[in-house]
Image: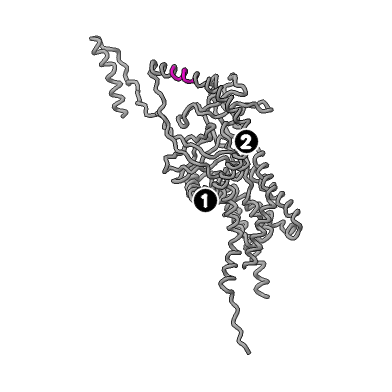
Amino acid sequence: MEPNRTALPFREFSHRISLIFMLTLAAALLLLGRAETYVFDRARQVVTDMAAPLLEIASRPVAATRRVIERTDEYAYVFDENERLRAENARLLAWKEEALKLQAKVARYEALLNVQVDPAINYASGRVVSDSGGPFVDTVLVNVGNEQGAKSGQAVIDTDGLVGRIVSTGPQASRVLLLTDLNSRIPVVIEPAHYKAVLAGDNTDWPKLEYLAAQSAVSAGDRVVTSGDGGLIPAGLPVGLVIQTSAGDLRVQTFSDRGRLDFVRVLQYEFPSKVKRQDPPEVLEGPPAGSEAEETGDATAPGDAQAAAVE
Amino acid sequence: MAKLEPYSPTPASRAGRIVMTIMPFAIGLVCVLFSFVPVGRIFGSPLTPAFPLMAVYYWAIVRPEMFPPLAVFTVGLLFDLLSGGEIGLWAFVYVVTYAVVVTQRMLVVNAPFSAFWIGFAFAAGFAGALAWVVVSIIHGVFVPPVSVMKHMAVTVAVFPIFAMLFGRIEARVLQGG
């Protein structure tokens, strides 16, 4: 009996000490996590890479079940849907004609003006394998890692529009910061008037529009696309529609539905930033009196020398 | 007179004991992984219940000695590492909630299931409020509390299913042990 009598209070005591120690450690971690980000980012990536295959296996039955439910829904409304699609198809055919005409016109103007067209964007497709996890974070894991060319900052889209951007990558998986996350900021343009703004997530379903010019006449229903500012995300990706809340704020209903994310594309966009630097010459000299040929030669020489020096 | 052999646990009972010791922690880890499986997408919703909180509460009430603070901390930290949010947020929230639940466990330990469930509703409310305060302080803004409220409401709603499941697993392992 003697050992039991002493063991119980001791166990209680050690339990209490361990609780205090863990509380202190967790609080310290919360503070340190803000300062020492590299170590935790590494740890996070290692854990994510280890968990990604497990999550991928676990997410398969979920995706299959969802597809079965969707298919059942489709069967239930197949006639109505067919009718709707016929009407839509007739409308889209008229639009297609219009689009083809405009495409030819734009191509002619581009050729006339010698416009630099954006290079074609490569992409890697993958599946969303994990959910956001927690009410304060809107991120998902996709099974496209840096082995498939994913890099931090790349845009991720699905069939509806922009989903978010990659914030960290491992060999097999990447983390995508969704548009609704508290830390998400995406430069956008509101069509048709081309007002620029920043789409800022705030942990609600509808991100805000920040830095919108005071006089801009944006109204509910306007289309929001990426502006391409900053060179991280290609311009013109569909983002969503402007909506007005009951409080009068302008927010954006995103085209992509984070409750239905499945297959996504990671856009491997490289901003054409390798522009030759052209500094003005340090001393500006007037053209020397002489022939016209010499004049042109003198005027271009310092510029070339500068460019060569920069390279 | 027959000579009595000194008593020593058989290998089977030893194995059972080991399983029983690590089982609550293993369930906690599985709960963490399960929170990231996009189950909500079956219904077209991004909401996922806080499965680790269910495990923390259940074991803190039923067998706190088998789910020590270190296990709670590890479960919370693993959740933080996988979630991509603030490091230490859920480790801190779960350890504090565990501490509160352990001190109040006598209120619900032998009470009917409804009391156990109401206790969980309070624990979930406390954990959600604490997490919301910490996140708001860290970001320096008033984070909209709607998402955490929804998250905790879903967690409380599905808790009975998981509590029953944990109870079954516990009974099975206890019998086996």
x then y, percent, for residue B144 = 65, 37
| Residue A31 or residue A251, whichever sits in front | A251
Q: Quadrant of the C terminus of chain A?
A: top left
Q: Which residue is drawn at 45% across and 43% down?
A: A145
Which of discs 2 and 1 lies nearer the camera? The answer is 1
Q: Residue A204 lies in what quarter of the image?
A: top right
Query: Which mark is on residue A179?
Result: none
- The residue segment tinted magenta is A98-104
Q: Three-letter amino acid code at disc 2?
A: Thr
Check chain identity for marks 2 and 1: say if they share one: yes
Q: Mark 1 lies on which chain?
A: A
How would you rate the neighbour count of disc 2 (Cα within 10 Å): few for under 14, some for 14-19, many for 20 or more? some
Is residue B107 visible to us here? yes
Q: Residue at x 42, y 41 (%)?
A: A148
Query: Which mark is on residue A54?
Result: 1
For label 2, the residue is A204
Q: Mark 2 lies on which chain?
A: A
Q: Main secondary structure of the magenta part?
A: helix
Q: Residue A222 lies in what quarter of the image?
A: top right
Mark 2 near mark 1, Cβ–Cβ under 8 Å? no
